Image: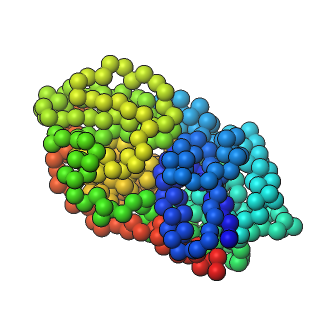
Amino acid sequence: MKKVIFVSGSVGLGHVQRDVRIARELSDICEDLQIVWLAADPATRVLEEEGMTLLPECHERDVGTSIIESVAGDSQSVNMTEILYRVRKEGRYAGAVSSFLKILERERPDLVIADEAYELEGVHARMPERPWPPVVFLWDFVKVYPGSRKIRDRLTARGVNKGWDRAFRSPPDDRWTDIFLGDAEDVPDERLGWGLVNAREGAKRRYKFVGNPLQFDPRDLIDQQAVRERLGYGPERLLICSAGGTAIGRDLLALCISAFPRMKAKLPDLRMIVVKGPRMDVDLGPVPEGVKVVGYVPRLFEHCAAADMAIVQGGGGSTLELSVLRKSFLYFPLKGHSEQEINVSRKLERNNLGIRCSFDGMDPDELARLVLENIDRLVLYPLITHDGCRKAARIIADLME
């Protein structure tokens, strides 16, 4: 039996959900395969629900989630380069690498799959004396932008981008495979920085592009009425408001609740589900009739399939799901989070998916207006790729032969 260690480094839920789909696809292809997982809360909650085998180190792992939440606080902004700076300054990456090396010695895997486990990127090249197993690294964006105009943020972003530059200039490594979960057009067609290579051209030389990853088969959710009945919803209009997997997003959800009476006055049959997520333990204030506030919802995509519209942050996972489900949605990229503000938003705008909003200046009247204008609107999204999980699994399976 071959063993795979799957490191799911996501601070939210989008990555681990697609990782589970990749793992299941891989298990369908490869016989006698054991997959063990290294992840942190809240990803471990998904893995436990899916019956996955977790390594004991999961209980102590926290590479960046708590830092992100402390940087953001209760606001709708999070300085991504500040997070990257603190992760390194506090030794989170160094500690995670040390722990992982011990895991390798104990588990002796035949392959490692790493998704958003940035502490492991390039570490094998810096430790050539160690007998590394083959590694598959999953990417979904390239290039970091400064979270502010501060010198430290600019230097941090340049340092991270120089890492991509070095990788793109390096010769191929037979024991390291980079898979990009998306399309080449998702990588900026611009330099990583002054004197650095073009991001898209570099990625094309090094990455295998497989298309967008989706954790479910959209064909299973085509019949909205059947999904509604199975989940216990009636014929009323349904609006889903979700803050994602971290504790960030209280203000956005509170705004949705404040705007609901204005929506309800125009749409008497409207019902709103507010999803706080697994790590948000805050009081959102008085809840009007017609609104239900819940915590972590497994398989939230099914509820989105049942809904008429959604309001979310700017995460790549949630916005991809809503796009494939062909739902009207408003998305609020976290201010200072370059992946959401730039990488994901460019992709959505390029394909005319969803409606980008800014939390700054947004009030209940304006939010209600946007919902009322779009909840019954027929969306005409272009077809986008969504079989990246299956294609990634096939590439990984070939490496294990």
Relative to residue 362, is residue 109 depicted above or below? below
Relative to residue 329, is residue 246 depicted above or below? above
**Quarter of the figure with the N terminus:** bottom right
x then y, percent, for residue 364:
27, 28
At 62% from the left edge and 71% from the top edge, which residue is drawn? 32
Q: Is residue 98 visible?
A: yes
Relative to residue 331, is residue 247 depicted above or below? above
Question: In the rendered view, does 151 fall on the left or right side of 20?
Answer: right
Relative to residue 101, is residue 278 depicted above or below? above
x then y, percent, for residue 271:
22, 35
Residue toward you, 267 or 148: 267
Question: In the rendered view, does 373 fall on the left or right side of 15?
Answer: left
x then y, percent, for residue 203:
57, 70
Find residue 268 and report its image quarter: top left
Q: Spot the residue most to the right.
A: 129
At 71% from the left edge and 69% from the top edge, which residue is drawn? 110
Residue toward you, 75 or 49: 49
At 56% from the left edge and 34% from the top edge, which residue is drawn? 69
x then y, percent, for residue 92:
72, 43
Find residue 362 and report its image quarter: top left
**Quarter of the figure with the C terminus:** bottom right
Q: Is residue 207 visible?
A: no
